[in-house]
Image: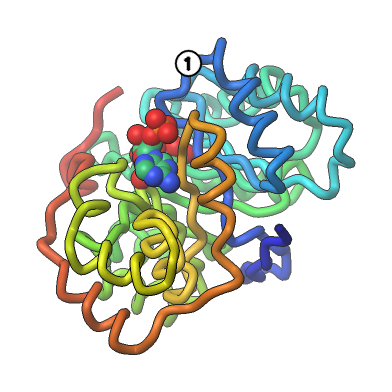
Amino acid sequence: MTVPALTMNNGVEIPQVGFGVFLVPDTETQAAVQTALEAGYRHIDTAKLYQNEAGVGAAIAASGIPRDELFVTTKVWNSEQGFEPAIASFEASMDRLGLDVLDLLLIHWPAPDLDRYVDTWRAFEKLYAEGRVRAIGVSNFQPEHLQRLFDETSVVAAINQIELHPLLPQDELRAFHAEHGILTEAWSPLARGGDVLADPVITAIAERLGRTPAQVILRWHVELGNVVIPKSVTPSRIRENLELFDFSLTAEDLAAIAGLETGDRIGPHPDTFSRG
Ligand code: NDP
């Protein structure tokens, strides 16, 4: 299964579907990432917080896949925001991953109470200028946080990775991203495997198309233009979540899924979350 790539605002390409590893224990991460690589994933999303960068790195090293065919994202956690701490966090992540150059580095949360994301971004700009990272971006940023980076720094974020699923389609933030040339990346794209997978709107579309509910939701993301990073430790689901490019949804399907919006979040609100 070949996954199409989207082009970021600096010309670097990112595979539209990646493999997320939040809540996968480090001891199980190598096997899960290995299954994902065998299924055809070439994009892995981890973070310092997940404590499984070493498992990701071990799977990459064992795979024999040429480095330039892989796309790896990691993130700097709140407690390591600030210029020097962010550089140190990046270097420690790279040691655990066993990589020299990273594809995408994200600020995990804006944590506005800490007020360090501008300094953190300046560290990211330095790493980018030095060629240590191919692209830099943010996660969980609201328009006001992005605007502050536009006003006070030089490089425009390539991506904003945000909570996004049918219950929380983030139409306004996606429009803001489009206006500023920032790609939208959806975390918890399946609403963490919750009730939405059993919603009659989703299951009816899935039955008509002969697909699974998860595939319908992931295809919805693809048609919105989102980068999407579903997580699974189940081999059949890992494979299923990549098989999205031989069917499509109708305008009626998209309208029906739009009707599922409730505004409910799985994660905390970015305006107030600043846990260290
Ligand atoms: P997802 O929406 O990807 O859902 C994962 C859950 O859905 C798991 O319980 C999984 O079960 C289940 N699942 C996966 N595929 C299927 C399927 N085909 N059918 C039925 N159930 C399925 O949630 P995540 O929160 O993990 O988000 C994905 C990734 O986003 C994370 O792994 C991480 O990389 C990133 N993320 C980023 C955040 C940020 O702040 N930047 C915050 C949270 C996540 P099982 O594994 O048992 O198969």
Using residue 142 as the reference point, say whether residue 234 is left or right of it: right
Question: Image quadrant for the C terminus?
Answer: top left
Number of numbered discs overlaid on the protein picture: 1
Relative to residue 95, is residue 72 depicted above or below?
below
Mark 1 lies within 8 Å of ligand 1 (Cβ measured): no
**Residue 28, image x, y percentages:** 55, 16
Seen from the viewer's position, the closer of residues 64 and 127 is: 64
In the image, taking residue 263 as reference, residue 162 lies left or right, namely right
- Residue behind mark 1: 25
Q: Quadrant of residue 186?
A: bottom left
- Which amino acid is tagged 1? Pro
Q: Is residue 171 above or below residue 126?
A: below
Residue 44, image x and y in percent?
61, 40
* Vertical side of 178 occupied by 134: above or below: above
Residue at screen point 49% across, 69% down: 222
Residue in the image at 56% along x and 10% along y: 27
Location of ligand 1 given as a quarter of the image: top left
Q: In this rendered view, identify the residue nearer to me: 96 or 120.
A: 96
Measuring from the top left, give residue 249's x and y in whole percent. 42, 79
Toward the top, the furthest residue is 27
The structure residue drawn at horizontal position 26% and vertical position 64%, both measured from the top left corner, is: 202
Q: Quadrant of the N terminus?
A: bottom right
Camera-nearest residue between 257 and 229: 257
The residue under the point 27% across, 62% down is 203
